[in-house]
Amino acid sequence: MAPGLEEYLILSALLFSIGLFGAITKRSAVVILICIEIMLVAVNIALVAFSRFITPVELTGQAFAVFVIVVAAAEVAVGLAIILTLYRQRHTIDTKKVDLLKW
Amino acid sequence: MNSMPEMLTWIIPALPLAAFLMLLLLMRPLKIKSNLNGYVSIAATAMSFFFSTWLLVNIVQTAETKFIPGFSWLSLEGAIDIQVGLIVDSLTAIMLVVVTLISLLVQIYSLGYMHGSKSLNRYFAFISLFTMAMLGLVMADNLLIMFMFWEIVGLCSYQLIGFWFHRPPAARAARKAFFITRIGDFGFLAAILLIFNATGTFNISEVHSLAASGVIAGTTITWACLGIFMGAMGKSAQFPLHTWLPDAMEGPTPVSALIHAATMVAAGVFLVGRMYPLFEHSEAALTTVAVIGAITALFAGTIALAMNDIKKVLAYSTISQLGFMMIALGLGSVAIAIFHLFTHAFFKALLFMGAGSVNHSTGTFDMRKMGGLARPMPWTCATFVIGSLSLAGIWPMAGFFSKEEILLSAFNNHPLLFVLAIIAAFLTALYIFRAVFMTFGGQVQSRFKPHESGKVMVIPMSLLAILAISAGYFNATGGFLKLLGDDHTHSWIYGIFGVLGHPLAWASLLIAGSGIFLAYAIYQRRWISSRKIARRFGFFYTIVFHKYWIDELYEKYLGNKLLNSGLFNLFNKFDSKVVDGTVDDVARLNLNSSKILRLVQNGNLQTYAMAFMIGVAALALMVILVN
Amino acid sequence: MGLQIAFWVLALIAVGSSAGVILQKNLFRAALLLVVCFLASAGIFVTLSADFLAAVQVIINVGAVAILIIMSIMLTREVTRGSPSNRLGAPAFVISALIVFILVFSILTTAWPISGAEPAQPTTSVLAQILIGDPGFILIIQMSAILLLSTIIGAIVLMKEK
């Protein structure tokens, strides 16, 4: 029997939670970015699964996934630029030591 | 002479005020440093003097009390309505003339004495302000307004004592004068409030009539009178609030002559005189006045014996003479007190000017460093001796007549007070002639090259000397006292010569004469060594030399022990522990709670993300549970 | 049957590699595990008959994003410091578990309007129709272009030496 929508969505939920856990707990900015990528992948899986099982002909979900990928790419580019700038100025990308938002 | 238009009365205090404003707002910005400052204020005072004299002549002719309506100053519907107006009666008119005349002469004298001094602008400005306030004080028909002028007078006294504020003793003396008179002022203010509470009015004549009709009576009136007298004690330097006046001698000598001899210190006597209809209803208050006056007269007289600073001698003499006036008031006669105030103003101002002239020439106030000044300074010497004779009460000087009235009144009313007063009179003659002989008698100290002061100083002194002789003759027919309410008219021949028929006159002359002779024996001829006397009466001398340790008592015990380390310390502790403590605790509570709350805003984005996720989870749970 | 085996194997690889990303102490290996995760998700796209997206996933995520991340790891010399965690571990785990629970619960309780139609094969022309066809997302495509342009400019500005 082929896997149904629920299986895909549960897989997506698991990946999302793992990414979330990593994004919250990791101190290295790059790893946080990686975890966010995992979360985006999880979302894409959910979108494509919806597309496959609910709109298999129109493929609206896949169109959404395309946009998510675009935004993810943009986000990675800017995020990494910020991380590198940060590293250049403070010689660390540890979020514990980068808490200027405090004031 | 024509009667003066009523509204012109306003011009009497307005002129010095105008001079003050002109000096302060016009001349000061223009940085005019010459005697022009003095001319402005002298001109204003001279005009005030002219109007005051005109007013006095009118009053003498008509002998009526005029109330000059002013304007409504403060009006609260149904609660309070304060009208500012002027009283013009004989008491006011006499005070006006005394104040303006002495102020005028002192200012002329100042032109010489203060010549070349810095900040002449400030000096004359405050003299003008003082003159204005003093005139306002004697004319005010309203207790509240009177109190305001009373305080302005105190302010000017403070400013002028501390005129050389860069000298620490002067600054200290100014502060002391301000504080100690403030104690008295507190009593005065309390009395005003008490009177207002009892009568609902500040108007002096209304208060008088209410007192006469018995609306205020009993303990209220006694407390009110004591409060008023407390104010008078502060301003007139009566025991035990007298300590500021000797220190006030740190101010320029003309200021001492004007404020601390003739006018401001007399304000206390005037105040009691003005409120006399209240005092008449309180036997206790009158007795207090008389007793305090007698104590002060005697007590200050003894201290004056031991002072070496000529101005200090005069200061204690002033305190003593003010005590005499208080005796007269306590014995029931405003007229006699004001008469003595009147003559005293002239001869004491004269004596101060003489002391200033001596200082101008020798550069010191210490009598031990003076001596033999009679020859190089004939005018100063002559006028000073005239003033001294008048103060000692020698016939036919002005002082004789006024003091004679006081002694007579004491003799008739209260034997104990009479004894105290006659001892004080003896002391008066002794200490003032001690000063005369120490200053003008004996040998010239070699290091000085004394010279007579300029005309601008000698002329006011000569005028005052004439008045110190003749001021008593205003009462030759009893007219002066009649003007103020005591009716004993007689011919002028009796007034001047007839008094000598009374044995009391001879007694007091004898007392004064023996005082002078004793001074002559000790300080001029040196038949008796003053050192030996000091040794013989060592205990007494020590007490007197240290002014009965009153200052030490106030400073060490009252000031330091009781107030500083006791009461104020307590207040300080209360303030720092309870008041500040509460504030601090509130702040600390905020600080600590924010320390906890701060963790929420720790600047770490991941914490925010987690909080965000908690919110998301909570919302989702809610949706699930609701469905 | 083959689809089922493929799904389970790929799902296992995806979950395992993403868990590895978190557990891995070595930053560089974490980045490599991300690549594995991307590849696994591309495989899952294939099982969902989204061939175009699978290719896009491989080209963009594996080819560009992962490389970018690896390069920045090397530039920041963070490898030596490893991948330490902060003190939020326990609450974050609870929250993540809670979210999984909530998601799974709602996934299982929702009645999905499953369409029984056969999926379009190949997807490329259909996607092109949707994205740039007449009733499609052409405006969003143009906005994506603007977004990418501004990203490029932004990255350049950020990295420019002062």
Image (spheres, coloured by chain):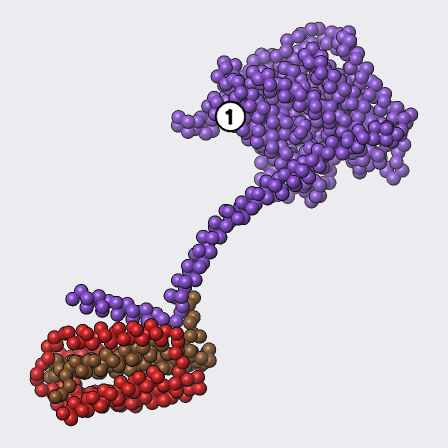
Chain colours: A brown, B purple, C red
> Which residue is at a point 32% across and 69% down the rendered structure image?
B611
B276 shown above or below A85: above
Amino acid at circle 1 = Leu
Specify the quadrant that holds the N terminus of chain B.
top right
Toward the viewer: B345 or B7?
B345
- What residue does disc 1 label? B194
| Residue at the image position 86 percent from the left and 31 percent from the top | B535
Label 1 sits on a secondary structure element that is helix
Residue A32 in the image: state x and y as whole percent.
35, 79
Residue B602 at x, y = what percent?
40, 68
Residue B19 appearing in the image: no
Q: Position of residue C31 (x, y in %)?
A: 34, 87
Vertical position of residue B113 compared to residue B591: above or below: above
The quarter of the picture where residue B20 lies is top right
Q: Residue at x 36, y 89 (%)?
A: C29
Residue drawn at point x = 59 percent, y = 12 percent: B63
Q: Chain of mark 1?
A: B
Residue B53 appears left or right of C132: right
Q: Residues within 10 Å of mark 1 (few under 14, many from 20)?
A: some
Residue furthest left in the image: C117
* In the rendered image, the vertical position of residue B91 relative to residue C62, given as above or below: above
Residue A30 seen = yes
